[in-house]
Image (cartoon, rainbow, N blue to C red):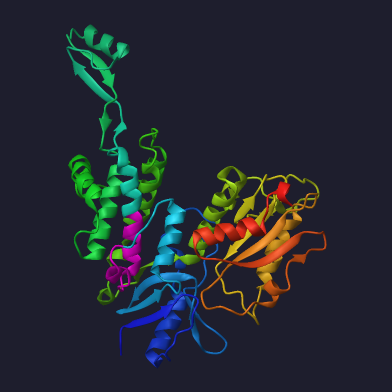
Amino acid sequence: MSNRIVIHDLAPLDTTPSEDERRWLEELAQDTTTSDYVIDFGQSITASTPEPVVQCGPDGIWRAGRYIGEIYRDGRVLEIRPRLGIETIAAWAGAALNVRIVPDAAEHAHSPSFVAELLAAAWRATVTSAARHGPPALRAPVRHVSPHVRGRLDLPATLALRSARSPNVVSTSRPKQLDNPISSTIVLADRVLDRALHRTGWRGQRIDELLPQLKAAVGSRPALPTQRSLARVRYTPITLPYRGAAELSWRIARHRGLLANAADHTDSGLLIDVAELWELFVLHCARRAYGSAHVTHGTRLTNSGALLHAIDNPARTLGRLYPDVVIGPLRHPWAIVDAKYKRLVDPVGVVREDLYQINAYLGTHASAPLPLGMLAYVDFPGQTAISRAEGLGPWITTIGHTVRFQRLPVTANHCIAAMQQLVPRPHLR
């Protein structure tokens, strides 16, 4: 029996599992906490609602969920491959990180470690872009006690020395230093990725030039900085591109699943949430279509409509509504879009929970002009049949909102054009 089970995301297992494999899948589905294995590419609404990696339907057929990657358990591995192909997933990840990601060599991109290859490509593009103007040198205060002033004179400390008959003065300078949390996270992420890929030449020339400088400052195995220490870093306009590189590096460095293998007999692995990438891709296309100033990500909403208000104290609320994308002014948006990485096909069609969800989002905007509501599904290649929800649309709510259940193209230019056609600016209506 093979120790590797291969399946595609959102697809059924195309072979009948043996009794041992079935028991292994049952234990995996029951005991796996998905969030322990997922590396995210940015903040998203989707990530807050994890789903099972695999599950068995009423028909007894095992199906994969919305994740791709590998999970190792008890000497076996579940490999979930992207049904849309690694190139499409790389393009979505690039949109999420605002960089162009090119998987390095097709034979590596389609290897069993394809997720590590994709992650390495994303990290390489992000760090290379950030390093365009130099290494991540940050200014930090350095105290000097010497006969000469270096930087700013520390008068109280100098008076204390002089009272003790010392000829020295105390001063403080702020030189640029590479010994900082950014350098540490980049070095650690490189270490994890290099051990996971088992090959040379994957970094690229710019990173090969940068790493010796960083290692000379922080060493080859620095301690992993905390998220708090990274958040306290004060970036300059030159070093600001390193913020995204540091955040991605930190997520990679803390994740040991990249170093696992099927013979470890430990529970480990690495997953990428494709539904999260689809949400961030739709957000990217909306910003390209309407301008960043007119598009708000749900993670940025702080005053979203509440589900319930206390009768005695309306300021007290219970439950919040956070759509994925809001297009237009927040008080009177043009459209509210929720990205769904699902197949819009009959007889399932629109899931009841999703229908309630978009209706609840629109219900918080009951005054004219009413926004358009849209559930944005993936237009999977080869899906020619049009579902009832999409074919009979657009629909209208009892209040008067127009609602669309729409499949969007998986490439950026076509998706942008489709959104501009579906959600015209107010002056074009």
Inspect the magenta stretch and tell me whether residue 296 lies in it.
no
The residue at 29%/53% (across/down) is 189
**Residue 97 in sight:** yes
Res 400 quadrant in image: bottom right
Inspect the magenta stretch and tell me whether residue 109 lies in it.
yes
The residue at 56%/45% (across/down) is 292
Asked if residue 415 is positioned above or below residue 78 in the image, the reply reads: above
Depth check: 306 or 329 in front?
329
Depth check: 352 or 51 in front?
352
The residue at 34%/44% (across/down) is 130
**Residue 237: % across, % down:** 40, 33
**Residue 48 in sight:** no
In the image, taking residue 307 as reference, residue 226 lies left or right, namely: left
**Residue 340: % across, % down:** 58, 66
State the quadrant of the N terminus.
Answer: bottom left
**Residue 66: % across, % down:** 49, 71
Magenta part of the protein: which range?
104-123
Depth check: 219 or 93 in front?
93
